Amino acid sequence: MGTSERPPPRPGDTGGGNVAVLVEEDRISVAPQWKLMWWRFRKHKVAVSAGFVIAAFYLVALLANFFAYSDPDDSRPAQSFIPPSPIQWFAEDGTFGPYVHPLVGERDFETFKKVWEADETVSIPIQLFARGYEYKLLGLFDTDIHLIGVPEGYESESTIFLLGTDNFGRDIFSRLVLATRTSLTIGLVGVFLSLVLGVTLGGISGYYGGVPDSIIQRIIEILRSVPVIPLWLGIAAALPLTWSPTRIYFSITIIISLIGWTTLGREVRGRFLQLRHEDFIMAARLCGARDGRIIRVHMVPLLTSHIIAATTLAVPLMIIAETSLSFLGLGLRPPAISWGVMLQDAQNVQTVAQAIWMLIPVAPVILAVLAFNFLGDGVRDAADPYGG
Amino acid sequence: MTGPGGGASPTSDHGSSNILEVRNLKKHFPIRVGFANRVKGHVRAVDGISFDVRQGETLALVGESGSGKTTAVRCLVRALDPTAGEIRFHTETGKWIDLSDLSRRELRPLRPQMQMVFQDPRSSLNPRMTVLDIIGEPLLLNGMNNRNDRIDRVEELLRLVRLRPEYMRRFPHAFSGGQRQRIGIARALALNPRLVIADEPVSALDVSVQAQTLNLLLELQEELGLTYIFVAHDLSVVKHISDRVAVMYVGKIVEIGERDQVFFNPKHPYTAALLNAVPRTDPRASRTRIPLRGEVADPADPPSGCYFHPRCAYAIERCGTETPVAEVVDGERRVECLRVAELELPGVTTG
């Protein structure tokens, strides 16, 4: 070997003198951590697709009112439980042009069920960027433009029912879009707070050990023994009733995150404990590095990938928590709209039997949770490009 | 230093030519139990060792795993705080300083003179840093703030350890084990240390790479006038590199002396047993086997008397009750064995 050794060719490399191989090798050799992570993540097709799904979800959340076509709070008891009615894409003469037929409800006197029939004599065209109810785009601009809508003279609230209506005659599609916003964002602050607490306290615990470690570990054990649902109930009852349901839920998530950091705290502590004894940490200390530098330069950069992965995996838990707690009536409450609140309306068998489409909010819950889990798995695998 | 064939000590007068004098060094780890962390006992990882290291020599510290070699050297560089004892270091300016009770702050200016090479080249380099940053870190922390100066010095160091300077922008994952170990050596040499402590620097490497790395260490010693403390469990490696050998067993140095004396004429039964266990290249060479029975004694609960007596082929009743003290043999050697005067032990037979 001597002065001119090259790193050993990786298995699969055939021509040793192949220039392309050498260039590729050099590219890998000088690649910093985040680049290696990105290259490995890119190979994980499922995780990449999951990333796109999540991006789409958050786009919908960001522009929720734009994607909705009916006012989600506009209740019309007369048109409750309308089944999903799709858009017609082609006119009878075969020309393209999406339209809907208006629905006419007739009471079936045998079953006393209202039956909705399309009035095929009338066609109402569907327009892109049509005017509808007024809202604030991104919370800034007043507008009434929606992605789809009906021409002036008609109301989309009484004409388009993509996913049907609920017991109050509100449009499920539009509510679902707005619920996406609530459900995907309300827990993020809590996740972030857990993250900060977990990394800080776990880091102190693992790096210094001894008495601070014992104190923090005992606190974690105590917090972990608190049953969450009764606590949730108690806080929900204790918070002032004058607050809006969203504000109450937001406060609850923050309080819950004061408990939720414990898992990450333990993980970070474990990593710090392990890293503290790594030789390169000792080498840094032996050449005079202080604690601050060791933590900042040598320890935290090795943890970021784990933290990102842990956070990605914490988000679906938060979605599930919101959905199930709201379903039980402990989380968000009407008039707030979230996936859980929408499912709460589908709580009794009678409703489900009559209007199965009330269960539609289950689909985005499953899709979002799966997407986040796949993404988290991908990030976690990519996070350790040196393993193996 | 003296060549591997030689073996004569540089000088024998005590004090003036020594770079390090360790006296009665102890490191006891408390065993804590229960909720209140009550101390139940102590693991006596290092239990009162004394030795001198001479300027320019290589002192090898050998022993089975668990004998306290690594703990001992970690105490020397104060990666661990010793429980008791003195670590007298002869500084560049000619002063003797006891490192054992200095604070971290007081140690910092002395750090450059004493550096360490680690066993596992995978865990001794930060995977998130380039070679330039790894070797440049000691320079940065010791006042070389100009990046270009650091680049020049790192280039120089990489040449010194026979690596291409162009590799300095690479990350450790791009290097083989042997190359990584050389990066570790370059980092240790960055601050021009006088004493380099190598903790099993080749035991994680392939045999072919081991020889290269050892030769590099020997060449560097000659070029830079370094002093080595070399921890090893592989006696063939020790034979190749060391001037003197200290044999450790359960936290104690049972025998210390010139390499050739220790190898060809061991005075402690444990040394003889270790030497006997070295594989030979000549299968026909006859030898009397000294089987080493049992396990290394538990440093938390060592046997009475001589720690080695339960495994010793030459143990007599007295060995179980009396604790041996270091006896000076042949001028320079110290042996902790009660029967040192009576025993005739086989050493390495072939060169």
Image: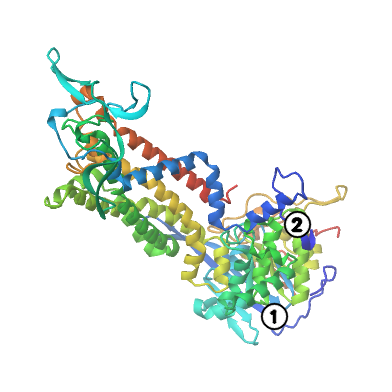
What amino acid is labelled 1 in the image?
Asn
Identify the residue under disc 1.
B18
Above or below A282: residue A74:
above
How crowded pointer 2 is (Cα within 10 Å; few <14, some 14-19, many 20+) is rated as: some
What amino acid is labelled 2 in the image?
Val
Look at the numbered disc 2 and give the secondary structure of its residue.
Answer: helix
Closer to the camera: disc 1 or disc 2? 2
Residue B218 x, y percent position in the rendering: 77, 69
Identify the residue under disc 2.
B209
- Say which chain tag 2 marks: B
- Asked whether, in this view, residue B157 is left or right of residue A54, the answer is right
- Residue drawn at x 81%, y 63% is B264
- Asked whether, in this view, residue A368 is left or right of residue B137, the answer is left
Among numbered discs 1 and 2, the one appearing first in the sequence: 1
- Asked whether, in this view, residue A293 is left or right of residue A77, the answer is right
In the rendered image, which quarter contains the N terminus of chain A? Answer: bottom right
- Residue drawn at x 54%, y 51% is A37
How crowded pointer 1 is (Cα within 10 Å; few <14, some 14-19, many 20+) is rated as: some
Residue A46 x, y percent position in the rendering: 49, 38
- Say which chain tag 1 marks: B
Tell me if residue B255 can be seen: yes
Residue found at the far right of this picture: B284
- The residue lying toward the viewer, choosing from B319 and A270, is A270
Tell me if residue B239 can be seen: no
